[in-house]
Amino acid sequence: MIFYNRRHMGQEGRSKPLDEHYDVVIVGSGFGGGAAAYDLSRAGVKTLLLERGPWPLRDDDDWSGSKILLEGRYRADSPVSIAQYDRAAKDVVLNAVVGGNSVFFGGAALRLRETDFAEWPLRYADLEPFYARAERLLGVHGNAGEDPTEPPRSAPYPLPAQPLTPPAERIFKAAKAAGFHPFSVPTAIDFQGSRGTACMRCSTCDGFPCKVSAKNDVAMTFLANADHNFLTIVAGATVLRILTEGHLARGVLVHDKHTGKQYTVTADAVVVAAGAVQTPAVLLRSGLQSTDRSNLLGRNLMRHCNAMVGYVFPFATNPQKLNHKQVCISDLYEFERAATGRAVGVIQDMMMPPPEVVRVLAPKGFRVAAHTVANHIQTLICIAEDDPQVNNRVFLSERLDDLGLPVTSIEHSYSENDLRRRHQLIKAARKILRKAGGLVGKVNLVDSFSHAVGTARMGVDPKKSVLDVDCALHGVPNVFVTDGSVMPTAAGVNPSLTIAANALRVSERIVTRLHRSVRTNRETAEARL
């Protein structure tokens, strides 16, 4: 495997990997792309993984709130234009880095519940073995049986949950006192130091790259443990479009940031895993909407209807600056299912951002006060399921970016039922924080796309879905999607583990479609990891 990172810039022969033919080329290196790259390479499939962002630097600035959250150290070159509610469109720049959003996630790795699959073309039981594999490969810590809505498992968690830090224990006890059944968040973090430095339980975890590589992100797990003889990774490579002949893809056209040149990469199959915002943009730029009989490509964008509930306490809530994203409450998960057809969602303990970030990002009218008392605030995040709405969409604008590509644009608004479900969680979060000793609280509505899913939904009927059950385009059978775009519904938990599990499932189908035999016994190989 050739890692093109900052140490390899300017290396002789840099263009060679982009001039070769590959069995599979993967666009995007997050949970969906990384899991597919791992599995395909382990099956002896010659695979090229393309990522438009750089490698994580993992230095002191990666733990700087100003550098990461305010200045956007890893922001992509091209903006995304977002219009929501009755507000004017605004430009935002999403992160782009090898490992995708996994580099910034807080480690939460929850499974969907059985009821969440009602509108999917597969059942929970179909995905369960792949959930188990994903948990092993990501090194997930958890306690089976604690979660009152937990679905059936074929095996316990690979590793036990860690003891609660004092701030997490405060929320755990308060939730129990309020009549809930809190449990330890299943977490993909290296607490053993298997790569050299164990998790330090620092406060710069959720939202930050891990400087000591203790977060089990995609780069540290799937990509590091892939078969290096069959996987090539190129960072700084933007896929301009997928190239097709007839009803088949023959490769991709790539812009190499480091050379400034364009390359045609040929492949037997293309896997798109650029995220639920950029994946439809790639497919639309490639003209593949012409093969979409459902007219749903880019539509049904979901991103969860989230809110942060913060309360001021009469004492410093986390004087040791420990990571306490350890507690989850799922008691309300099925509370609105009969009324709205969706899960309500979950509540999780959440870290406060650094004070300098609070001063900038706190709700208007509350910023100075929040910054002043930041050390006395403890927060819970409410993650509510949102409806798949056909008018919530990703599309291409007429404006062009620096590469001459149409700027990716988003239209999105929440439904009344989305707001209803979020309100249920906010009420419960307030109750828990008051039980924990909070005096006065403030709700901050979350306005991000870190949980975006749904823009290329899978299904059986080509008139009602973009992808088939194997997550191949109905009209182009050698173009696959393995990120959150494939999800018909968002459910009410973090989508990361589900994306990884489904990517492992789809990778097996890709190998079958390529008529390849699996080169190694994956279970034996993974037992040695």
Image (tube, rainbow, N blue to C red):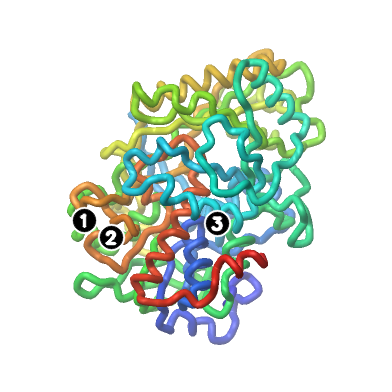
**Disc on the earlier residue, 2 or 3:** 3
User: What percent of the width, then of the height, locates residue 362?
Assistant: 59, 29
For residue 226, side relative to residue 302 (left or right): right
Quadrant of the rendered structure where residue 86 is? top left
User: What percent of the width, then of the height, locates residue 6?
Assistant: 63, 70
Mark 1–mark 2 contact, CB under 8 Å?
A: yes
What residue is shown with label 2? 473
The foreground one among 272 and 93 is: 272
What residue is shown with label 1? 292
Q: Quadrant of the C terminus?
A: bottom right
Check disc 1: other Cα within 10 Å, few if <14, some if 14-19, many if 20+.
many
Q: Residue at point 64% right, 21% down? A: 175
The foreground one among 304 and 143 is: 143
**Disc on the earlier residue, 1 or 2:** 1
Q: Total marks drawn?
A: 3
What residue is shown with label 3? 133
For residue 361, side relative to residue 252 (left or right): right
What distance separates the C-alpha of mark 2 from that of mark 3?
25 Å
Quadrant of the rendered structure where residue 350 is? top right
What distance separates the C-alpha of mark 1 from that of mark 3?
32 Å
